[in-house]
Image (cartoon, rainbow, N blue to C red):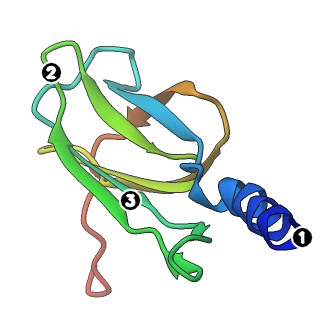
Amino acid sequence: MIRKAAVVFLALCALPLLAAPPTTAIVVRVTTLSGKPIDHASVIVRFISGHAKLKLYKAIRTQYELQTTQEGEAKIPSIPQGKIQIQVIAKNYQTFGDVFDIEEPQKTVEIKLNPPQSQYSVHE
């Protein structure tokens, strides 16, 4: 009887370890400073923080590389919640990169890209 109770107790203690980490669905909206959408911009999303308890605290590695639609949106499938790095590269605009702490089940990230700066030279 005690052995059966111990097995049930251990099984109940292991359930939280088997639960999947909470995930989020992210929409990245890329626009110019004036608010016009930028299409065909490359969006790179990396999950950078968190550890899986089930895999002996091995780091969870998730990365997506997408392009924006004509409306300037890139929809990322479910990704674990936590610190997420988003990088946006578009022709004729400055590259954007930042880390966001996302804890909501659904999130829209607004990114405004700057036009390129003129080149800097020491010889001028």
**Residue kind at label 3, given as amino acid type:** Arg
Of 10 and 24, nearer the camera is: 10
Q: Comparing marks 2 and 3, which lies closer to the viewer? A: 3
Q: Earlier in the sequence, mark 2 or mark 3?
A: 3
Percent position of residue 54, x then y: 56, 70
Picture coordinates of residue 14, whole percent (x, y): 69, 63
User: In percent of the image, x 26 and y 86: which residue is there?
Assistant: 123
Provide the secondary structure element on which disc 3 rests.
strand
Question: Which residue, given by chain and number where applicable, does mark 1 sit on?
Answer: 2
Q: Position of residue 106 (x, y in %)?
A: 53, 24
Extreme bottom residue here? Answer: 123
Q: Is residue 53 toward the left or the right of residue 108 in the image?
A: right
Q: Is residue 76 above or below residue 98?
A: above
Marks 2 and 1, how far apart in space?
61 Å
Q: Residues within 10 Å of mark 3 (few under 14, many from 20)?
A: some
Residue 76 lies in what quarter of the image?
top left
- The residue closer to the viewer here, 8 or 30, is 8
Q: Position of residue 120 (x, y in %)?
A: 30, 72
Query: For the residue carrying disc 2, how many other residues have a C-alpha within 10 Å: few (<14), some (14-19), or many (20+)?
Result: some
Badge 1, how many Cα within 10 Å: few under 14, some, many 20+? Answer: few
Tell me the tag on residue 69.
Answer: 2
The Cα atoms of the two marked residues, 2 and 3, are separated by 20 Å
Mark 3 or mark 1, which has the lower sequence index? Answer: 1
Q: Nearer the viewer, mark 2 or mark 1?
A: 1
Identify which residue, 48 or 116, lies in the foreground: 48
Amino acid at the residue labelled 1: Ile
Kindly identify the amino acid type of the residue bearing the numbered disc 2.
Answer: Thr
* Residue 22 relative to residue 25: left or right: right
Quadrant showing the C terminus: bottom left
Q: Are marks 2 and 3 in contact (CB under 8 Å)?
A: no
Which element is circle 1 on?
A: helix
The disc placed on residue 46 is 3
